[in-house]
Amino acid sequence: MNAKKKDRLLGIILLLISLFFFYFTMQQDAARFEGDPGPKMFPIVGCVITAVCGVLTIVSPSKTEGKTYLSKEEFKRAAKLFGLYASFLVLLWGLGFMVTAPLLLFCISVLFSYESRPDDSIGKRLLRSAIYAVIVGGALYLLYVTVLQTQLPKGALWQLFKK
């Protein structure tokens, strides 16, 4: 299968996924408070973005053959990222947002730093990743707690200490 056919097939799959999730999003209850966007807003935005990407991929497929997707190295990196995201869910439940978010940001930053800055020393990468994790983790916390006024998960471990 050539690149154009693959891109068009990918575009059709993206459109179908978008329509599938849009259908189930519309089954959600409406907002209960005036001015509250409700539970539909973010899934609908995601569906629209996915649909636009699908249509653009169908209309304008790549014109040249690209390199092989998911080589052995790329598959290893994707598996590491999947493992990090899966561990994020478990750690978020156990330790809460304040510990888990900076830890995940640190791990992802270290993982990406091997690609973006291969000449840097390990110590420099670790320091830069730690600074990034603390700053972005703090900014996310302030954004959610102060600006959006949401309550972030504290974790099951903290609930044990509370009793």
Image (tube, rainbow, N blue to C red):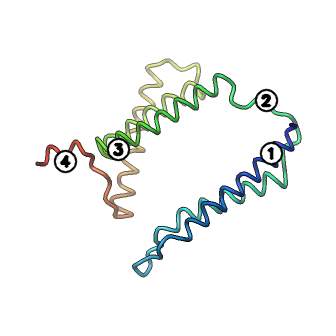
Distance from disc 2 to disc 3, alpha carbons, whole Å, reads 37 Å
Distance from disc 1 to disc 2, alpha carbons, whole Å, reads 14 Å
Callout 4 amino acid: Gln
- The mark lying in front, picked from 4 and 2, is 4
User: Exactly how many numbered labels are in the figure?
Assistant: 4
Label 3 sits on a secondary structure element that is helix
Distance from disc 4 to disc 2, alpha carbons, whole Å, reads 50 Å
- Rendered image: mark on residue 159: 4
Can you see residue 132? Answer: no
Quadrant in the picture for residue 25: bottom right
Q: Is residue 64 left or right of residue 37?
A: right
Relative height, residue 133 to residue 123 (above, below): below
The residue at the point 19 percent across, 48 percent down is: 159
Q: Reading the chain from its start, which is encountered first: label 1 or label 2?
A: 1
Q: Is residue 143 left or right of residue 96?
A: right
Query: Mark 2 highlights which residue?
Result: 67
Mark 1, Cα crowd under 10 Å, few <14 / some 14-19 / many 20+, is many
Q: Is residue 160 left or right of residue 46?
A: left
Label 4 sits on a secondary structure element that is helix
Q: Reading the chain from its start, which is encountered first: label 2 or label 3?
A: 2
Query: Viewer-proximal residue, 134 or 13?
Result: 13
Callout 1 amino acid: Asp
Distance from disc 4 to disc 3, alpha carbons, whole Å, reads 13 Å
The residue at the point 38 percent across, 39 percent down is: 102
Callout 2 amino acid: Lys
Mark 4, Cα crowd under 10 Å, few <14 / some 14-19 / many 20+, is few
Residue 12 position, x and y percent, is 76, 53
Callout 3 amino acid: Leu
Query: Mark 1 highlights which residue?
Result: 7
Distance from disc 1 to disc 4, alpha carbons, whole Å, reads 49 Å
Query: Mark 3 highlights which residue?
Result: 92
